Every structure is written in C-alpha cells, then in structure tokens.
Image (cartoon, rainbow, N blue to C red):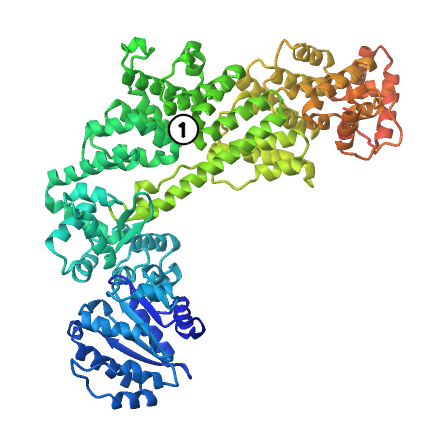
Amino acid sequence: MPRTRLFETLDRALADSDHGTSVVLVCAPAGAGKTTFLADWAHRTRAQPGRPAIAWATVDEQDNERPSLQSKLVQALRGTEHHQVREICEQIANPTPVQPFPLASRLTELTEPVWLILDDAHLLHDPVVLSELEVLLRAPPERVRVVVCGRFEPPLAFQKLRLDGRMVDVTFDDLAFTPEEATALLAEHDVELDPDNLSALMERTEGWAAGLRLAGMSLAEHDDPASLLENFTGCQRAVADYLMEQVLDGQSEEVRQFLVKTSVPATFSAALAEELTGRADAHAIIDVLEHRNFLISRIETSPTQFRYHPLLRSYLRAEIGLLGRQAVAELEHVTARWYARLGDALPALEHGIAADAVSDVESVLSDSGLALVLDGHAETVGRLLADAPRPIRDRPIARLVRVAAHLRADNPTIAGSLLSTFDDHGGTFDDHGGDESAFRTTLLADTLRLQLAVHTGDLEYARTRPVAADGDWSGDPHLDAFAALQRGLGHLHLGRLGRAEHNLDRARTHAREINSPSIEAQTSTALGVVALSRGLLDDALLLAASGRSKAAASRQSKAAASRQSKTAAAGRSGATNGHPFLQVANQSADSQWTSLLEAFCHYLRNDTERAVEVAGAPYASNASATHEIAVAAELFGLDTAPNRRAAVSALHAATTSGRAAHRPPGLIAVTLPSIQFAYLHIGETTWARELFTSAAAVLGQSGDVALLESVLLLYANQLERARAALRPVLEGNLPCAAATNMVTAWLVEAELSRRRFHDARIHDALGEALRLAEPEGVLRPFHYMPSASRELLSASRGRFGSRGSFADRVWASLPKTAVATTEKLTRRELQLLAELPTWRTAEEIAADLCVSVNTVKTHLRGIYRKLGVTTRRDAVTAARSHGLL
C-alpha cells in the first residue's frame, strides 16, 4: 500500500542528523496499520542503494526480562547483514542479568547509519528493562536512529526527548488513510466506490486501516455497496469480531460496563461519565483508556469532551441492549437531563425522545424548540419528532415545532396539514387566565399560520388579522423575534410598509439580543425591500450588505457547528453523515433574495454589469428564488445581447415558466416597466398586455398597474385614454408599490406631451422625473424613453437649474444610436405616423384629421421615403426602432 507522504516524513525525520532527531515514536491503536506501514517503509528502504541498514525487533511479553530483550536486539542487528554491525554483535557475549548492556557503547564505533525498529514496544513494563532502554534512547550512538512502535506509549522518558527536539511523533491522525489511499486499498479487493459511497465509508471508518480493510473484504462479496455501507457499523460480524479480539479483549468487566454506558451520548465529559456509570473514578478510567489509545479521542472544549470511534461506538450501542430496556431508558434520561442543565437543547431533545420522557421533551421544546429551528436545525428537529413515540409527537408544542421545521425546510404542504389539525383558543395573555405557557403556544400557532399564509401567497389570514395582535408579545426573545419577523413580512407582502418596518425593526432588535445572525439576515433583507419600495436605493443597498454579512456569519456558524459535530458525534448507527447534530440549515433562499434586492438597486442605477454579477452569485438551488434570479438575469442582460429580439424572447420564456415566488408588491413592481418596454420595443404587444393582466391580478389597483395600462395605450396611440389612466398616478391618488416607477410615470407623461406637441408640459414632466430620480441616482427609467423624447431631454439641457448636472449624467448614460433617416419628419408627418399602428384606412385617417385623402397619401409617401421603406408595416417597425413611435 503506497503511503508516500508518511514514507517521506519518516525518511526526513531519521535522516535529520543536523537537527538532532534520534527517536521516532509511532503510536496508534489496534488496527491503525502502523506495523504494516513500517514494514512497507522498511521494504522500500532496503531496496534502495546506499540506504541505511534496518534492524527489526518485535517485542513480546517475555522480553520484560533483561537478557531476553538484549538478545533480541543483538539478533535483530545481526540480521541486517551489515558487515560492521555483524562484527560488533559477534563481539558481544550474551549478557547475564547482572552484567551491563554493552550494545549502546559498542555501536558508537559505527561509521554507517543503522535504523533500529522496536515493534510492539507497548508490551514492555519491567522497570529494569525500561531503564536500560532509556539509556539507548537518551544517548544513542551518533549513527543510530530508533523507531519505537506500539499501541500506546511505554513508560519511557519521551517528554525530555520532545522538549529537546530530538523526537518525532507519528500518531493515529498521521496514519489515518486519506480518500485516495483508501481507494488504493479497496482496489486490492477489486472494489471501486463512487465519491458518495467513498465519503460515507471514510466518515464511518475515519481512515482507520482495519475498518477500511474489513469494509473492502465485505464489499468484494456484495453487489449493493450503498446498502452495505449504510449498515457498515460495529454490529457487522467481521467488525464486531475484530473489535472483540483486538480492542476489547483483556478489558475487565468494570471497564467494559464503563464503555457501554458512556457510549449513550455522542460525546461525554468526565462528569457526565460519573453520572452515567456511578463511578467516582471515571476520570482515571478515561485517562487510562486515552493513554492506551483505546479508539477514544479528546475534544478540546470546556469542559474537555471525549468520543469513541464511530465503529466502536456503534458496537457498544448494540451491546447496551443487554442491560435491559428500563436501564437503557434511564441512561438516556440521565443524558437528556445533563444536556438540558447545560442548555444544550439538541442532544437533550434527542436523548429525551430516546428515553420516552414526555415531560422532559415538552420542556426542551417549550424552552428551545423554536430556537433550534431558527438556528438551523430544522431538518434534524423535524426528523427527531417525526420518529418520536406518539405521546411525544402529539403534544401541542411538538406539533408546532414540527410545523416550524417544515416551513423552514420549504415544505408548506406538510406544515399546513399539521397546522390544520392543531386546535388552540387564541386570545391574549389575559384570555388564557394568565397561563404563560398556553399563551406562548397560541402566539406560536398564530405566527406559524401567518408564516404559512405569506409562504403560500394566501394572504387572507394576514389581511384579516387584527392590528391589535401586533401588540401581543411573550417576553421570550426567540419567540418574539420570530413573531415580529413574520408579522413584518406579512405587512410587507400586503404593502403596509409602515407596519412592516415597525415589526421588522423589533425583530432585528430581538435577533441581536439572542445573537441570531439568521433572523437578523432575514430582517435586514426585508427592511431592504421596504427601502427599495420607497425608492431609497442607498438604504436598500446598505441593508442588503448587512443581510449578506449576517447570512455569511450564519453559514460560518453552522459550518463550525458541523465541523465540531463531525468530530464529536457518530450517530446511533455510528455513521456521522446521518447524525442529527450534523444537519445545518440551507441558507440559499435567504441569500438569493438578498442578491436579488441588491441587483435591483444596481439595475435601477443602470449599473447592469454589477447587477448581472450580483444576481449570478453562486448559491445552492431554491426553486422560487432561482426562478426570480433567472428572470432578473435575462432582463439585466438585454443591453449587451447581440440579438435583442432573441434576448427578449428568452426573457418572456423565463417570466412565463417555472414557479414564481410570492413577493412583496414593491419587489414585484420594480421591474415591470422594464419588462413591458422590452416587449413593446420589439412589437410584442400581446406579451405586454399579458404582463399588464397578470400584474393587475397580483397588485390590484396600484399606480404601477395604471402605469402599465397607460404605456399600452400610448403605444396604441390612444393618447387621451393613456393620459386618463396616468393622471391618478401623477396626482398621487394611486400610489405605486415601487416608488421608482413614479420616475417612469413622469417620463410617460413627457412622451404623451410630445405626441400632443405640448412643449411646456414636456419640460415640466422631464423636470419632475429628474427631481424624483436625482436623490438616489435612478437612471434606468430614462432608458425606456423613445429616441425623440431623448432628443427633447438633450434640447432642454441647461434649463433644469440645480438639476442640470444630474440631467447631464442622465444624458451621458443613455445609449447613443445612429439615426437612419437623413431628413426629419415634419410635424404633420409625425402626426400621421402616429396613426399608422391603428391600421385605419387612409379615408378614415383623412376624415379624422380633416384633410383630403390625397393629402394623407402625399404625407405617407414622404414618410416612407424618409424612413427608407415601401410598406405601412415596415414604416411602423422602422418608426419604433428609431423611437418615433
């Protein structure tokens, strides 16, 4: 088995005479592959020319007698076939028990290097033997290096060597197989695993050589690797036999009972071990186990925790059943109460459920169930409660926590089903007769109903909730943070920005109090949507950045907890990947909505490059948010698309496919004009009308919908109807859900005035658009203007007073397109051109304009000539492309 990295480490250590390294200690538990590794290294070393002589001595129990060990070392050295070493060994007479050991002094005569391997050194315990061996280790001959190998350190003075920098340690962690090395080992059994199965095997074995070898032997005879690995635990016959023979054999009954009882929790401290075993000497037993490398690991926390290897723990967990059901339940109960006292809710919940302790579980859920869900353990908590006995599962608080977990995991159907069968009486704290627990349960139920309503888009519950309900609080910062967040989101989705902001501010305050970056990230993003809806782009960007920062902190916190759990826990089956402690919340949806908010702000400022970059940030998939990101990405890319019609078609396909998310009105309305103008600019009036219809169904009577209607009428040249639709928006009687759409509304008014040749009104409308756009640097709406309107903006430059510099900035941001016509259309020709999309006959147009049919035809010929076309349809298309329609 190639172990190149370790071979090189050993070579450097033993050859490092300049730094005084004289001893290498290879110390690891049974099955770690240390002897095999040293044998492979020795074989490789001997095969290389000019390499040192290697002497190998394997210790056994008889070597605790002084002559026996000395003879064995002499025999090992003689077996090197190194001429000078053989001569020295032949000159050494067999020593007697009272004679000094002359080997160390005689080896000083060596002129060539010799490396001495002392295997199974942990079997040495005789004080005299150990004392003489120390002489060799403390002051070895200059050309001699010693490798001491064993399951645990023999009682030799290694610490002095470490302090002097003359010793190198090779531990279990160093010997643990990497995935690549495990793959090579499995190949010896003709076994090849895919990455997922290999990862599962590495988690179960933690690179333990014996575990990998046993797995390879089992897999070689199995046609379903995934199912075998799922059940590859210490209970499997081959693994259990190995553990019995190589690890547990020789342990006293007291120690075995200690091992079994302390295997109940995934990790344990010395104090918890005392509670579980009733032994005051628990710390001493752990010290002995640790010293002897008994597949036990130390976790440097406060207090120090310990854990067994996953395969060993799963074996011990199986053995615990022999104690009897009641005894096992009591051990689980002790563990649950221990963690509950420490405030460690997740293991308290797990062990409380295992103990079937209804009151304990109910207490944990009441105190910390919602906090667990909010802190990212929704999947774990949901699974634990779903598998719990019915008396636990049917408790009101258990059902509500399951609802919260399913909503957090984006399972609204299951959440709704559970919530529909929950019966509470509602009301305030006083209505519950002062029963705090009952009121908190009711408050949680009400909040979950509101969250479900917002999640599914069925806002009737949110709409009919009494405003007074916003004043009911529990005093529990976790519950109140959650309630305030959901109330804020409910008001936000109903367009009640003031109430939304009030509740979201409260949620953010509570989130900071309980140090919950996840809730703070959500509140920051929601407050950013409030700011965007009000047209406050600077505030929205700051809040988006805060939301992104808090989301990153939340992910880092969960990742750290996951890493600690991987070290600390091994699950009931001994499999770390299935252990509940390892599950963390998926923050992708929150992150994507934050990105969408930030991208919209950049887009409104016409920084489409930055908008595309932000919207395209890599996050894990979330169906609804990903759909919105896809639509935004198509919209933001229109400016640089080589084929605009194809790009707009892709935008339309994106908007009409996939599952649209339920969004606040402001977030829906902010890009509607952009999409509608994109459709109309390529002549797709049907798509534009469909957009207006769907927006009206979602937003109802709002200024944004009236704006879309006005634009449709403008493009149909129904100018008076367009102005009538737009008037309540401009007069403030019909507010826009997205305040930035007011800029667009005034620009539409400017275009309507241009069509009716009201020059003064054009200037006033442009000035109002600039006034609204300047404070936040809103540039994008000006890009919707037809070319003719842009020329009016240019012509009015210098006439906007204090907003003149912003007008110049707007003009500089506009795309400069070449004018294809060599002659400008006359005022009468422009008037006639506006009638062409109506497809009325020349006679009908002549009657309406009070001119002769011949006059109309003369003007038509002039229009066709100037536009370079020959048909009416081509004239309409060319006029639209040049912004004349």
Could you say where residue 865 lies in the image, as x and y percent from the top left? 87, 29
Q: Residue at x 38, y 20 (%)?
A: 447
Question: x, y percentage for residue 553?
Answer: 47, 37
Image quarter where the N terminus lies is bottom left
Q: Is residue 674 depicted above or below 219 in this figure? A: above
Q: Is residue 777 left or right of residue 483?
A: right
Q: Secondary structure at mark 1?
A: loop
Place of residue 97 in the rendered image (x, y in percent of width and height, measured from the top left): 16, 80
* The quarter of the displayed image where residue 220 is located: bottom left
Query: Which of 248/714 is in front?
Result: 248
Which sits in the foreground, 674 or 683? 674
Depth check: give the residue in front, 654 or 548.
548
User: How many numbered marks appear?
Assistant: 1
Task: State the quadrant of the C terminus.
Answer: top right
| Residue pointed to by mark 1 | 514
What is the x, y in percent for residue 174?
Answer: 36, 62
Residue type marked 1: Ile
Q: Which quadrant of the view contains residue 841?
A: top right
* Residue 185 at least partly seen: no
Seen in the picture, residue 47 relative to 384 is either above or below; the reply is below
- Asked whether residue 670 appears in the rendered view, the answer is yes
Give neighbour class at mark 1: few <14, some 14-19, many 20+ (Cα, 10 Å).
some
Q: Tell me if 681 is positioned left or right of 260 in this view.
A: right
> Is residue 255 found left or right of 829 in the rendered image?
left
Which residue occupies the foreground of this view, 786 or 825?
A: 786
Look at 28% across and 18% down and name the residue there. Answer: 437
Quadrant of residue 28 in the image? Answer: bottom left
Residue 378 versus residue 87 in the image, above or below: above
